Amino acid sequence: MDKEARDIRDLLSPWLDGELDPDARAAVEAALEKDAALRGELDAMRQLDRFCRDLDPVTAPPELEAGIRRRLDARVVAFPRRLPARRVWPLAAAAVLVVALSMPLLYRLSAPHRMQTKMMAPAADETADTVQLARGELAEENAPSPEAVSAGIRADGGGRREPAPAEEATVFSVEEDESAPPAKARGQQAGASAAGLSIQNRDLEKAAPAGEQRPGYAAREKTPPQPIAEAAPEIPETVAGAAPLPLPAPPEKLDAEPPETMKKAETAAPETLRQSAGNRIFVLRENIWIQEGYAGEKTQPLPRDASFLATLVELHPEIGEIAALGPEVILLHGDTWYHLLPAEKG
Amino acid sequence: VLVVTISNEPAGFSGVEEHVRNRRSNPVPALKEARTLSDEALAALCRAGSREAFDEIVRRYRDRVYAVIYRYVGNREDALDVAQETFVRAYRNIGQFAGESKFSTWLHAIAANLARNRLRDRSRKGRNMGTSLESLAENAPAMAQSAAASGLTPRHNAEAGELEAALQDCLDRLSEEARFVFVLRTFEELPYAEIAEAADCRPGTVKSRLNTARRSLHDCLQGKAVL
């Protein structure tokens, strides 16, 4: 069989299925008229097709749907597409809470060493120191003792120090998720997000040079005179060139009441709380995705099983995309703000 | 002039009032409208969390998806399992359906992947349930049920069962790729472009696989004196 005949033979299936362009179709038809073997092959294909179509249709067994439902229910798939922000939000809040709660403990752990080195601040200033410690605003003289540091208790993340070497042991860290930047880079981010908070052991050798003026210095000087201030220049010597570092906890106002810290986390990781859908921007507030521009107008409740929603989505497919943001969404359509709610029938 | 008619007829008689009353007391479920929606609109609703839209998708595609998988894997047990998983995966990944292809193509691609995995699992385990006697026996109740529903005679059932088994045996002898392409074309009547998308190959490859499949199947069925 020559190449041309082979090529024509290869076109029999598409010819039978009506998938050829007019030129190719004409070529096949011309070949069919001349070639009896080709006609025989085409007949065989037709016969096979007829045979297959004459078979009883295969229908799904009745248990198929029940099985699907069972599997879906077993997996508790409330929404097909889970947004990363929804997973990260509780984690970020928990991280802020953990760090906030651990600050007094850190302070207590460092207190005995301050006494040893006669660097302990007056009781009245304890709170202020803690705040400053948390902010990384205290200078070396007010930092935990070498022992405390060597015990590996140190907060990192304020970005005011060199990042810790990779080989240093991490005592405790709260990570956001795999998408968070690596610890080193994160340590350099000013006001790292709650997710980026980490308390790390740091090698004393990596301490800042003696007498280096820190941003917290000026602030510290505003407080009543203390032994800490006097000891300041001696600190590097005291620790033999390995000055204990202050505790620069990442977020500011870490000691503020929980709602404030929550707000902080929100601003620290804005990318997790803003979402674009249907060419609009939505912001997550109290588990509701709210379209930008919403200013507390009256909303029209719209359950997901409402037939009106089906119509809306049919006419405006972007509404479907918006509705997929989460269980509750406030969006503007026309002149009406709709509040998308979970299905009434569950 | 406003004419007020007082009638003893029930309020619902007017139609409009009945509609309003019904909607208030018993909101019309989305499913009723869902039957009139396009696949893509159903997918969008499904993305929005509507299980009713998903139920409609299942209702629309259950037989088609099951049939393709059944022809592909060759036995009822695996076909049922893979078909169920196909719909579950579709539901879970509906967000990934971008609407660039037809919904049916997307669904068939999921089915093809899962069915292919099942066949490979089976061959790894050395289990060939293709058209063994056990699988025929296993499929018999479903076939009988289907035949009974269509009011066919036992003789017809037996003949249909034989033909079905012969086809399935010959299908099992094809390569997985050729089998999938043949099933989508012959039983689903999908155009080549959609088959190529579902099978993740070029349309030219679909042509050659179909040619191969048709020739091999014809020879095989002729060898069984079925054709």
Image (cartoon, coloured by chain):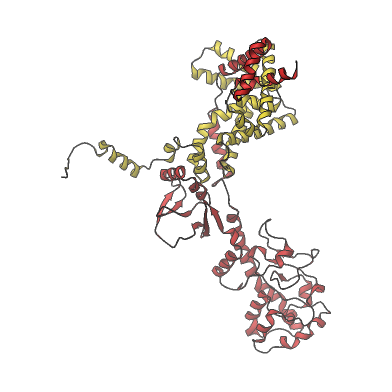
Q: In the visual, does A238 lie left or right of A179?
A: right
Instruction: Give the number of marks.
Output: 0
Q: Residue at x 17, y 45 (%)?
A: B2
Viewer-proximal residue, A131 or A214?
A: A214
The colour chain A appears in is red
Q: Residue at x 74, y 77 (%)?
A: A144
Return the x and y of residue B54 as percentages of the image width and height. 51, 39
Return the x and y of residue B142 as percentages of the image width and height. 56, 22
Q: Residue furthest right?
A: A240
Dividing the picture into quadrants, the one containing residue A235 is bottom right
Please say whether residue A183 is visible from this viewpoint: yes
Return the x and y of residue A322 as percentages of the image width and height. 51, 50
Q: Which quadrant would the N terminus of chain A be assigned to in this image? A: top right
Please say whether residue B227 is visible from this viewpoint: no
Return the x and y of residue A216 as percentages of the image width and height. 68, 80
Viewer-proximal residue, B129 or B20?
A: B20
Chain colored yellow: B
Q: Residue at x 51, y 60 (%)?
A: A286
Q: In the visual, does A303 lie left or right of B121?
A: left
